[in-house]
Image: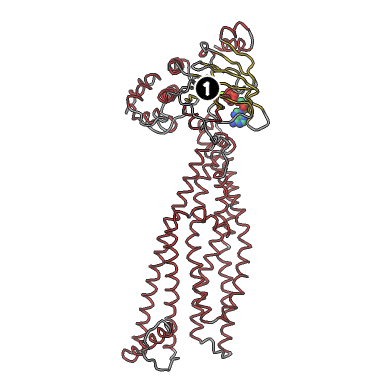
Amino acid sequence: MKDFFLVLRRFLGPYKKYLILNVSFNLLAAFMTLFSFALLIPILEMLFELKTEEYALMPMSLDNFRESVVNNFYYYTQTSISSFGPSATLAFLGVVLVIMTGLKCGVQYLATYFIIPMRSGVVRDIRNTIYDKVTSLPIGFFTNERKGDVIARMTGDVAEVENSIMQSVDLMFKNPIMAIACLTMMLMVSWKLTLFVFVLLPLAGWLMGAVGRKLKAASLASQNQWGRIMSNIEETLGGLRIIKAFVAEKKVRKRFHDESQVLYRLNNRVMRRQSLAHPMSEFLGTITIAIVLWFGGNLILSGDSSLSAQEFIYYLVIFYSIINPVKEISRATYAIRRGMASLERVDRILSADNPITDPVNPREISKLKGEICYNNVSFSYDGEVQVVKDVNLHIPAGATVALVGQSGSGKSTMADLLPRFYDVVSGSITIDGVDVRDMRVTHLRSFMGNVNQEAILFNDTVFNNIAFGVENATQADVEAAARIANAHEFIVDMENGYQTPIGDRGCRLSGGQRQRLSIARAILKNPQILILDEATSALDSENEQVVQEALERLMKNRTTLVIAHRLSTIRNADLIAVMNDGYIIESGTHEQLMNKNGAYTRLVEMQQLNK
Ligand code: ADP
Ligand code: MG
């Protein structure tokens, strides 16, 4: 329960107004319940003709408020009986009871009405906070977390928090108020009986709690499994083409069904455990009522003057009204335990720390020249295997430097260190002499443009994809960029030109078209530093020609780090560095390296053989 209030403290801040309204209306409803049921006493008394004294109208005053209200109520009832008869009076009292209850229900609805925006608001806030967090976390975080699991946390777990914790907020405010009001009234009617009840209730509560404790663990296991299933779905949708090509449908189906089966078992366990709440509280409730009946009945039978029969009936009615809130509280605590498990999973994302931080005193470069230095840089993804080893590389402003080498030799890693997708483990990288870690991350990245092997496009129009990194780009800007990227022709051939949607990840375009769009995007951003990671290697040679042309225009007058698979495309680079197993083993211009007849020459020869 402590957790629950901590959660409220965390999220309810902006919704205090609603909470106050909710509590006020709940208080009102509680009082109305007590008073409408109090009408039962005179009704019963009239039925059984228990009251014989004559009542006279009393002046109302604050000193004897309760006494005068009760007295005058009896007075009016008596006058009504003598002038309209007992039957009409009974009917009249019944109508009053109905109206009071109607009012009470209306007030109860108002209480719920005001808590709803809070409930949905908190869920919206959590969802937005996770999205913001996900976009701020470094790329490295998502290689450790499975994408599907992150999606599961953003959707399923947030929904679970809504269904369990937020739905319980209503119950957790309404019911304690009701319970306390009833309890107070019970104390006023008969403190002896109530003291007796006080001993029983905590006992029942403890029993209920024992079952609830196991619920959270089961729930956590179930949500984790749900994450695994989402990962599986995500992977399947991404790999559908391969699954079909390799006729692996049966295999993936079996894998999915197995995961589903695990979830099925876990869910059964959670729901069975949660369903215990209802029968258990019902059973315990009945036991308490039986005991109270026995104890209270004995009080009356023994002639104890503190409790009359009709008061006892009223007492039982209130006691019955306390059972329901207590039941709902117990159900809510069960639901909250389930929700807590989900909230823990959500918090794993929210509390993940971001090692790529802005410095306390960031340095700004107002006029960037674009000289890049890797100084004794080493890097490891996992803290064990070194992927980049003590590398020194100098890229003069405006020069083009190419990294070549076998796949897995660390080229892409080198490129990722520059915009701080990862931070170096030792050594440093400087731009114009300033360590990249001494700049604000956004400032640093504003100088850079990326074109990768897989063009990453968004499900939007051509125009918006090109203008992605630039605020307020005009049609003319975008068109100019597209022309340089050799993309203008094919764009105007599309049915809506620049306003044509390109589909999920650009799936309605060919590989070369996608790549030219991503080049146009980089051109429009006009970065001083350009990182090209195998930008043409996914293309056929005809497309490659067109894209290569676009790239060469893009590289003009910029500092460029180019990673190339096809060596023919980097022949003119100012410097070529050959990487092997994390080291730079050779560097120089194409001619120098060819004359050396070393690793580079062998790479070139191998490619010529393959042609
Ligand atoms: P290249 O681009 O030259 O093909 P990479 O820089 O992508 O090589 O990879 C270098 C090495 O780092 C490889 O052995 C690869 O397995 C490893 N590696 C790459 N990315 C990750 C990652 N996110 N986590 C762990 N290891 C990685
Ligand atoms: Mg690579």
Residue at the far top in the pictured view? 595
Few, some or many residues within 10 Å of mark 1 (<14, 14–19, 20+): some
Picture quarter with the C terminus: top right
Q: Is residue 418 above or below residue 219?
A: above
Q: Nearer the viewer, residue 356 or 585?
A: 356
- Residue 44: percent from the left, percent from the top? 44, 85
Residue on which the image places disc 1: 432
Give left or right: position of 594 versus 156: right
Q: Identity of the amino acid at label 1? A: Asp
Ligand 2 is found in which quarter of the picture? top right
- Residue 66: percent from the left, percent from the top? 43, 82
- Residue 413: percent from the left, percent from the top? 58, 26
Picture quarter with the N terminus: bottom right
Looking at the image, which residue is at 56% across and 72% down?
Answer: 285
Q: Is residue 63 above or below residue 463?
A: below
Residue at the far right in the pictured view? 384
Q: How many numbered circles are shown? A: 1
Is label 1 within 8 A of ligand 1 (CB to nearest ligand atom)?
Answer: no
The colour scheme applied to this rendered structure is secondary structure
- Residue 45: percent from the left, percent from the top? 44, 87
Residue 516 occupies quadrant = top left
Q: Nearer the viewer, residue 598 or 310?
A: 598
Circle 1: element type: loop
Give left or right: position of 531 versus 224: left
Q: Is residue 409 above or below residue 324?
A: above
Residue 30 occupies quadrant = bottom left
